[in-house]
Every structure is written in structure tokens, then in C-alpha cells.
Amino acid sequence: MRTLLNIICSKKVKYYILLLFLLFLYITVSAVSYVNAVSYDLANSVFRLHVIANSDSKEDQDLKYIVRDNVLQYMNSICKDACSKQDAINIANEHLDDFRDIATKTIKDNGYNYDVTVEIGNFSFPTKNYGDISLPSGFYDALRIKIGEAKGQNWWCVMFPPLCFVDVSSGIVSDESKEIMKKDLSEEEFSLISNEDNAEISFKFKLIEMLQNAKILTAKN
């Protein structure tokens, strides 16, 4: 026992333990820095749409999708020429009342009398797949539409680049949308969200997801 304690307490062992600790610290700091940089660039390139139903009842969920469809149709008409995230945000800001009116009219036309709240802010999102593009969980700027008590399941997509109009069933994102995103992201960042069959890229995506989930949980508590 004394021999074991002597070994543990020896200067050489302490030196190796210190080295291992410093290596772990370096890897952790590097990983966090990498995730922060990638997440910052992604968040700065994406503007999302978020529609929250009054409740989880079938009627309220069906209503949410009708509101979504009408809002998307209008959004497509006013944001089709947006060439940057900031352009899309500016356009949305200028038409907040229109979004509210469309949602309110849709709700009333379908026999309901829910209030509608429309706002632009920075909100937490889980990982989401848009065809062959995946966005990791994190905080993103978004146009949020809350129906009634907004206690039901929500729906979200990307207003810019225009991924809301992706045929998710076919798993295809238009080349035009991808080119817009490529302009605002580095080659590696675009690879991270492109569902590439690459072990290194997949590991990095999981790393971003893991650390971002930890930050989201912290922000909510």
C-alpha cells in the first residue's frame, strides 16, 4: 500500500496527471470555441419562422397548419427577392401587422377567436432537418407567431435562405437555396449541415449539437 501511495505521490506521476489535465482543458476549450464560432456563423446566416399552436388538440394543430400555409404564401411573395438574412428580417419587420392580420383572419375564417402574437426575436430551436440540410440545435433569430395560449406543438422552417418551401418528402433542397447559404458560410460549415456521409463531419455535428443542447438547457433554467 505504501509503495502504491509513493508511486501516486511521486513527482513524475503528478507531472503526467497535470499534463493530462491540461490536455483535457485544451481540448475542451478548443471544442467550445469551435462550436461557438460555427454556431455564431450559422445563426448569423439563418432567419427562421416559428408557428405555435394554441394546444395539442387535433383541431388546434390543424388550424396551426392552415395559418402556416397562408403565412408562407404571403411570405413567399414579399421575401422572394431577399438576398441576405438582414433583408429578410427588415422585410418581415415592415410587414408584422400584415402577418398578424393574415393569421387573425385565417383563425376567424375557420371558426375560432384566438388572439395572435407576432414578434421577431432570438429563440432556442432543436435540431431540425430540411430535406438534405440539417440545422443543429441552438439560438436563432426568428419570426414567431403564437396562436391563442401557444401551449401546443410548434412548427418551424427557415425563411432565409428560403428552405420553408422544400419538399421534405423528397429530401431535396433547391440548388438556389444552397448557393445562398454557401455564400454566407465557410466550406466546412456548409459541409456540417449538408448531411454528408463523412465520419469526421458527423462527429463535429454531434459535438455542436451536444454543447448547444447543454447551453439551451442552461438558458431555460
Image (tube, rainbow, N blue to C red):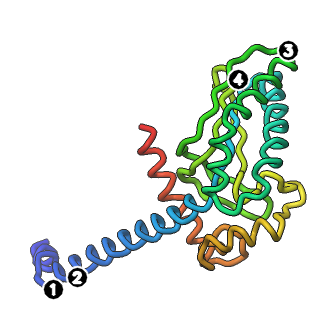
Q: Which of 180 and 27 is in front in this view?
A: 180
Q: In which quarter of the image is the C terminus?
A: top left
Amino acid on which the number 2 mark rests in the picture: Tyr
Which residue was labeled with disc 2?
16
User: Relative to residue 161, is residue 154 depicted above or below?
Assistant: above
Amino acid on which the number 1 mark rests in the picture: Lys
Q: How many C-alpha atoms fall within 10 Å of the one at disc 2: few (<14), some, or many (≥20)?
A: few
User: Relative to residue 21, is residue 173 depicted above or below?
Assistant: above
Q: Quadrant of residue 81?
A: bottom right
Amino acid on which the number 3 mark rests in the picture: Gly
The x and y percentages for residue 126 are 61, 49
Cα gap from disc 3 to disc 1, whole angstroms: 77 Å
Q: Residue 111 carries which label?
A: 3
Q: Please indicate whether residue 110 sits to the left or right of residue 87 in the image.
A: right
Q: Please indicate whether residue 2 sits to the left or right of residue 18 in the image.
A: left
The x and y percentages for residue 146 are 66, 29
Cα gap from disc 2 to disc 4, whole angstroms: 57 Å
Which residue was labeled with disc 4?
55
Amino acid on which the number 4 mark rests in the picture: Ser
Kindly state the secondary structure of the residue where label 1 is placed. Answer: helix
Kindly state the secondary structure of the residue where label 2 is placed. Answer: helix
Mark closest to the chain's N terminus, 3 or 1: 1
Residue at the image position 41 percent from the left and 66 percent from the top? 32
